[in-house]
Image (cartoon, rainbow, N blue to C red):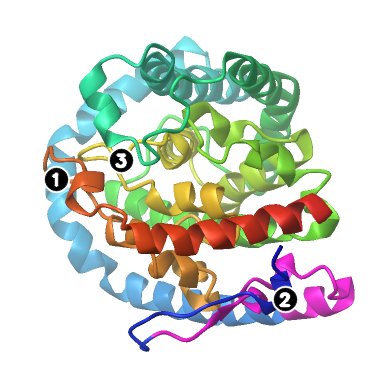
Amino acid sequence: MFDPAELSLKAKDGERCAVQRETVPLMAPQKSVFRYVRQLWDSIRMSVYIIGTALVVFVAARNSVTWHLQRIWGASGSYWQSKWDSIYDMFNGNDMALAMWGLIIVSCGSFWMFNSFLLIVDVTEWPKFLLRYKIQPTANVPINRKKLRSALFWVFFNLTVVGLPLMYVAFMLMKWRGCSFGRELPTFHWVVFELVIFSLVEEVFFYYSHRLLHHPLFYRHIHKMHHEWTAPIGITSIYAHPIEHVFSNMVPPVAGPLLTGSHIATAIMWFTLALISTSISHCGYHFPLLPSPEAHDFHHLKFVNNFGVLGVLDRLHGTDALFRASKAYQRHFLLLGLVPLSQQIPDDAKNGKKFDLLQQEDDTLFKRN
């Protein structure tokens, strides 16, 4: 048995510094809550400064970047406006019905359509050629049916018993904020700008709420449920304790539209993209032409790295050091060909033993917590 306090991972080429357990302060139970909160506050201030600077640069450049896209949008803008007019008339200007049914049908419907496909592949192991793209090739083969039934129950629970009341609360907050529920859609360049803002806001809220859930005070009672799946599948994106689902799954994506006072159509589109994105991050497959899920899959496997969505704050705080020293990081890009990245960049035995040692330390620490 190894002592977690003595654990360090050193890169052999000498170009990387030792990665100590202190790299992830949330995993150190001996630290006081007060010291942890103070350190977290310092990190937030640093992040706000850096992200704020990035936003200023983006705002300065966005007109020239979106001018060409606006020309494309102009050709199809009347099409989307006419479709929205039809939807708007269908609900006779009832804002609550428009928001609630839009979220249920479009956002939740897209989530289940995408994950139904993934479930077919996971449960039937068909078509076989898709299994080549599994990130952890031997995991969930075959899938544990009892574990899957439990996951499906909690996903339904979070989407209905927890999710529906929170959708109503979000609707009321959007009305209070003055968000538009009207007939006229926003311009294309404004939608693009808002989506960038949403992504950055979600990164901040999710990163810090996620790291907080990894503190021993919260992990054992709340977040450990989500980490039962060390090799996640798509639906486990919202397989979580209801408290986690509220504060870490729902608040981060809702915060952006509330901040900018977005149109309900933009908000529904954003929530749909967020649900599909988190499903991809948890799907366990690195498919061609889809965003890489390597980072979050690595988080489920090793527990201590990659707490964010975009990786911006992980890079800022150094909570991706172990990931960046792994073969998974080398595979962390958009696959444009058909040859699986696990074949192009396979794990080597030496690297595997090193990370197996670290995993033993993580398992020991979490059992203590």
Q: Residue 210: in sight, yes or no?
A: no
Q: CA distance from mark 2 to mark 1?
A: 42 Å
| Residues under numbered marks 3 and 1 in contact, where contact means CB atoms less than 8 Å apart | no
Q: CA distance from mark 3 to mark 2?
A: 34 Å
Disc on the earlier residue, 3 or 1:
3
Picture quadrant of residue 116: top left
Instruction: Tell me where residue 69 appears, x and y as whole percent.
Output: 17, 51
Dot 1: few (<14), some (14–19), or many (≥20) neighbours within 10 Å?
A: few
Amino acid type at image mark 1: Leu
- The mark closer to the camera, 3 or 2, is 2
In the image, is residue 348 above or below residue 240? below
Dot 3: few (<14), some (14–19), or many (≥20) neighbours within 10 Å?
A: many
Find disc 2 in the rendering and name its residue.
5
Local secondary structure at mark 2 = helix
Residue at the image position 84 percent from the left and 75 percent from the top: 31
Q: CA distance from mark 3 to mark 1?
A: 11 Å
Residue at the image position 72 percent from the left and 66 percent from the top: 27
Local secondary structure at mark 3 = loop
Residue 336 image label? 1
Instruction: Tell me where residue 105 appears, x and y as whole percent.
Output: 49, 17
Disc on the earlier residue, 3 or 2:
2
Q: Which segment is the magenta one?
A: 16-39
Instruction: Tell whether 346 sits left or right of 298.
Output: left
Amino acid type at image mark 3: His
Find disc 3 in the rendering and name its residue.
286
Instruction: Tell me where residue 162 appears, x and y as whole percent.
Output: 74, 27
Amino acid type at image mark 2: Ala
Instruction: Tell whether 297 sits left or right of 44.
Output: left
